[in-house]
Every structure is written in structure tokens, then in C-alpha cells.
Image (tube, grey):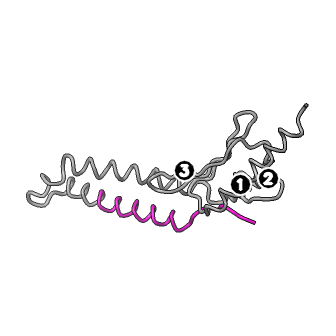
Amino acid sequence: MQQATWNHAQYLSVLSWTLSSAAITSAQLFLVFFPFGSLDEYVLGWPLGLSLTANVILAIASTLGRRDQHVRVSLTDNGIQYDDESESYRRTELLSASDIKKIRARRNPFFKSLTIDMRENNQRFFLSNVSLTETFLAEANALINRNAGNARQVGPT
């Protein structure tokens, strides 16, 4: 059984960049409030602004990268099993392959995200910072296409 899970290693990588950026920004802010000689002219202006911007972007990315740490998506014979085992949101759904419109993985600069779009009610299941293989996507799309073909054949004649 193929699974897509939360990618712990990628999260730690983004978190380490976030903490490094926070350390650099903190050092720059320290030099702004406690200037040593003429160093403040090298810290103020665009270097501090760039550092603050990078820190905010990385903090948002690490927060989003941690969001779905208890989610697991598994392929079954009947469809896709979506499990969210977080304390506040316990949810288990069996997504029938005939109800799934499409499944895709997107890559952003920090991590991959898995999106499952359903045919009805414009519902979407999501797993950010996913660890999955290309065979997972190929098998999931084959399952969806096979059931979509069977649904067309069984329909009214």
C-alpha cells in the first residue's frame, strides 16, 4: 500500500533556515539598539529590511510546513484513505476514486504539497510538506482514471 506522509526532514531543514535567519535579524536589531562605533550605518536600511522580510517569509513557511504533521494519505483498492490524527481534529475519510476529480503534487520553494480535488461541493483535501513517490501519484491517477472510465461505462445507455 502506497502512502504519502508528512516530511519531517524537510520541515527541520526549513526550521533551521528560519532559526538562522532569526539569529541574524536579532543580531542586527541588537546593533541598532546598542550601536558599537560606526556599525549601525551598515545595519540600518536595506540590510535590516531584507533580513526582516526573509525572517517573516521563513517563519510563515515553517508554520505552514508543520501544519499537517499528523496527516497520512494512503491508496486503497476502493479509493484514497485520508487520515488526520491531530488532537483537535481527528478525521478519517475514505475518498471514493469515482468522487475524486484530480490529485496533484505542487512544489513551492520550501516543500511539496498534495491536493485532492473532489467532484462535488468543491471540496479539497490537502497535505502540505508531503513526502511521496512518483509511483504514488501514478497509481493514484490510474485508480482515479480507471474508476472514472467504469463510471462512464455503467452510466445510462
What's the residue type where badge 1 is placed?
A: Ala
Is 119 included in the stretch rendered in magenta? no
Alpha-carbon span between mark 3 and mark 1:
15 Å
What residue is drawn where x is 30% and y is 58%?
26
Please, what is the three-letter code of the amino acid marked with disc 2?
Gly
Question: x, y (%) of residue 12?
Answer: 49, 66
Q: Are marks 3 and 1 in contact (CB under 8 Å)?
A: no
Circle on res. 140 = 1
In depth, the one of 121 and 76 nearer the eye is 76
At x 50%, y 64%, the residue is 10
The residue singled out by tag 2 in the image is 79
Which residue is at the front of the view, 82 or 43? 82
Image position of 100 with respect to 24: above or below: above
Magenta-highlighted residues:
1-25
How many numbered dots are placed on residues in this image?
3
Relative to 84, is 157 on the left or the right?
right
User: What SS does tag 3 mark?
Assistant: strand
Q: From the image, tell me which residue sits under label 3.
A: 106
